[in-house]
Image: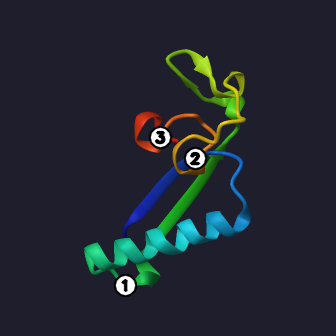
């Protein structure tokens, strides 16, 4: 039974979170040939005040520029995992 645990900075709308859950499930099903009933996806949202990169708390970073992919972290998701 695949269990996928995703941690994101909070702030995405319900539709985006639901799409993520559906598409992650579909990808795992495709890659692992796992039945969808066996796939578990956990989505955790972390407040910006509880996440830092290089000691800089994300709520201290300006959020006017959404950054790559519309992420308000100001950095791409593969740089800081959120």
Residues under labels 2 and 3: Cα distance?
12 Å
Name the residue: 71% across, 48% down: 11
Looking at the rendered structure, the secondary structure element under dot 3 is: loop
Are the two marked residues, 3 and 1, in contact with CB atoms closer than 8 angstroms? no
The quarter in which the N terminus is drawn is: bottom left
Query: At which x and y percent is residue 51?
Result: 61, 29
Looking at the rendered structure, the secondary structure element under dot 1 is: loop
Against 5, residue 48 (above or below) is above
- Report the residue marked by disc 3: 76
Name the residue: 50% across, 65% down: 41
Please tell me how crowded label 2 is: few (under 14), some (14-19), or many (20+) other residues with Cα within 10 Å. some
* Extreme residue in the left direction: 32
- Report the residue marked by disc 2: 8
Quarter occupied by residue 25: bottom left
Residues under labels 3 and 1: Cα distance?
31 Å
* Extreme residue in the top direction: 55
Q: Earlier in the sequence, mark 2 or mark 1?
A: 2
Name the residue: 27% across, 74% down: 32
* Front label number (3 vs 1): 3
Side of 38 relative to 21 (left or right): left
Side of 50 relative to 36 (left or right): right
Against 72, residue 60 (above or below) is above
- Report the residue marked by disc 1: 35
Looking at the picture, tell me which residue is in the foreground, 77 or 69.
Answer: 69
Query: At which x and y percent is residue 31?
Result: 27, 73
């Amino acid at each position: 039974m695949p269990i996928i645990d995703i941690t994101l900075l909070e702030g995405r709308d319900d539709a985006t979170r639901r799409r993520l859950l559906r598409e992650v499930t579909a990808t795992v099903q495709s890659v692992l040939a796992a039945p969808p009933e066996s796939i578990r996806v956990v989505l955790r949202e972390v407040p910006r005040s509880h996440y830092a990169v290089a000691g800089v708390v994300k709520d201290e970073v300006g959020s006017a520029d959404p950054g790559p992919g519309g992420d308000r972290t100001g950095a791409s998701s593969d740089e800081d995992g959120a």
